[in-house]
Amino acid sequence: MASEKIIFVFPGQGSQYIGMGRDLFNEYAAVRHTFEQVSDISHKDIADVCFNGPADALNKPELTSLGTFAHSVSVARVVEEHFATELYNIGYAIVGHSMGQYSALHCAGSLTLGDAARLLSARSTYMSMADKMGGGMACIVGLDKETVERCLLAATGHGYVAISNHNAHDQFTISGQNAALDAVIARARDKGARLAKRLNVAVPAHCALMENAQILLRRRLESIDVQAPKTNWFSNQSARVMSNPIDVKDALADQMTHGVRWVDIMDRFPEYNITSAYELGPGRTLTGLINRANVGCRAYMTDNLKNVRAMLGQLENALLR
């Protein structure tokens, strides 16, 4: 469709904030319709929680996931309506970070809206059920992988902790039990980390503590019709393009106990000659990571009306080349 190769990226939990999507909801019928669909499927007023909170409600895993999903997909719908074609016909590639994989798979024509939303609800429930020992996640920035791995030794005697996401060459997310997380954070600060702090995530995602959740999700996925993605879709676990529906199901289940190899995914952008990335959904986390990665790709955020309008103009120019 165009000489420029575009990737659409979808954020995960942690990008949410009160008020997200409100200006888009007021401007576009497609956004209103998408929020209404997700609300009907989940039997929850997703727009109200996203726009008005309170924070403790929005930060509950299920509502965070569904709100982020509704926001991301609604921005995709604006693009699709503007160009009168599906997003997978515009994007040379599509990828999501953690729960953003469900947004990505829906927009890649692999999961229906209903299946994606229901899977996200089930995923959140299974994760909450699995977290029996009290845990969460933390971010460490400014240390290399070897140093972070040495910092994990500080958790000895305090509980379980592991690297869960590798987001940049010097940025990691760790998951585990609370006392273990606190010990590793303290050690990382001693080692000179620019940032070492707890994240606003209520469960220790992407680690061995989620084994029971993985089993339950795998069973749930057996009854879900997953189609082959209609454009290049990157797996979080392998950092490679995946197309077989059985492999996609396995990837979604394995994601519960395996980390997100985001830095490896970004490092593959030059292989595919990807030149532009658009982050569809709340926040700018992935935009910042891509722009700092020096992989020959410029990223743009789209979480408000001004940025969505700018994206539509940029896409028009790209598609006309």
Image: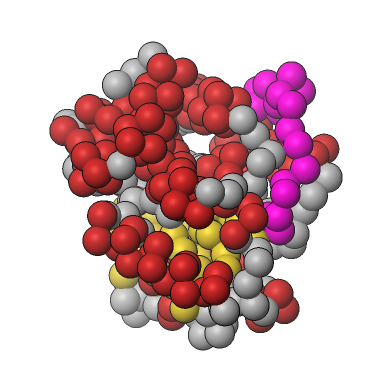
Q: Is residue 249 above or below residue 57?
A: below
Q: Is residue 204 above or below residue 96?
A: above
Q: Quadrant of residue 36?
A: top left
Q: Is residue 295 magenta?
A: no
Left or right of residue 24: residue 187: right
Q: Quadrant of residue 92?
A: bottom right
Residue in the foreground of this view, choosing between 30 and 200: 30
Percent from the top left, x then y, of residue 203?
43, 37
Residue at 53% x, 43% y: name it. 103
Residue at 27% x, 55% y: name it. 304
Q: Quadrant of residue 93?
A: bottom right
> Please, which residue is most extreme toward the top here?
43
Q: Is residue 76 visible?
A: no
Percent from the top left, x then y, of residue 39?
38, 22
Magenta part of the protein: which range? 216-234
Residue in the foreground of this view, choosing between 229 and 133: 229
Residue at 63% x, 52% y: name it. 88
Q: Is residue 220 magenta?
A: yes
Q: Is residue 283 above or below residue 76?
A: below
